[in-house]
Amino acid sequence: MVSKLELITFPSFCFPSPIYFLSLDKFGDGIRGNGYYAISLNGKRLARNSKFGDKETTSFTVGNSTPQTPPQTPPQTPPQTPQQYAWSTLFTENFDDTSINKGFGSFTDGGLDAMHISNKFGRSGLVMLKKGATNPARASVTSKNIQLDRNRHYSKFKVVFDFYANGMGPNDRFCLDYSVDGGTSWTTSQCAAGGGRDYVNGKWMNDEMWFFQTPVVGRIIRIRLRGFSESNWKRVFIDKVELVTRSKELTR
Ligand SMILES: [Ca+2]
Ligand SMILES: [Ca+2]
């Protein structure tokens, strides 16, 4: 509470600006009793008030200028939003390069039970995987090592692919593995079973998405697609594979 406000009288020197503002903030409890404030210049009353709430801004003029609204707070730069995680593609392989020995593209042929096929089931440039319950390495295709950007934080990966199953039953699977930092060991991300469990035979399954997250995100990653069935006639055909990662730039 303000119990007393003194009369404010400005000296009669030359004012640099014709309009001034006086703001009062009285702790929210007004002026006691018959209190008021007044502003005078050279004996002339410029402003006076005794009825106001917890704050008032009064403008007054010196000379003939028109009273104006109080100055506005200058516009502030909006706060920066923290950088978000975003998906980006590390590689896409269509197996479409038909020049000699190039069909596997950015993948490596694992051996006898993995093959490149030029045309099948209405698509061109495919990789076929069969068997693999024993000798899994030779029923697989392995991507090259992908160097990851040291300036980013990687939280998740996804493999997006088109595949077609032929003769696969409920106990016949194919799998996705990954390996970090150039190591020789593989971690299985996911396997899918045929015969209507996870997919049906005789139909292209497009843009399947399998996700995985590495416990410790290394600086190198590679993936492997692997057959996991008993029979030579249980086969999976893959038309394209894309490896996508979710990451954000590290702040320093
Ligand atoms: Ca082969
Ligand atoms: Ca293809």
Image (cartoon, grey):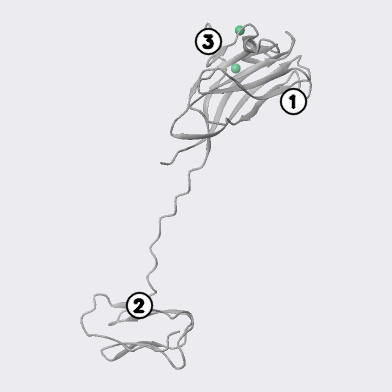
Residue type for callout 1? Asp
Q: Label 3 crowding class (10 Å Cα cut-off): few <14, some 14-19, many 20+?
A: some
Task: Judge depth for marks 1 and 3 and give the one in front.
Answer: 1
Q: What element carries label 2?
A: strand
Residue type at tag 3 = Lys
Q: To which residue does mark 2 refer?
A: 21
**First along the sequence among labels 2 and 3:** 2
Q: Nearer the viewer, mark 2 or mark 1?
A: 1
**Which quadrant does ligand 2 occupy?**
top right
Task: Count neighbours of disc 2 (C-alpha within 10 A) and say few if under 14, some if 14 to 19, many if 20 or more.
Answer: some
In the displayed structure, 102 sits above or below 178; it is: above
The residue closer to the viewer here, 211 or 52, is 211
Q: Can the viewer see residue 125?
A: no
CA gap, disc 1 and disc 3 = 31 Å
Name the spot of residue 199 as percent of width and height, x first: 74, 24
Q: Return the x and y of residue 219 as percentages of the image width and height.
A: 48, 27
The residue carrying mark 3 is 102
The disc, 2 or 1, on the residue closer to the chain's N-terminal end is 2
Q: Name the residue under label 1.
A: 198
Residue 106 in the image: above or below residue 76: above
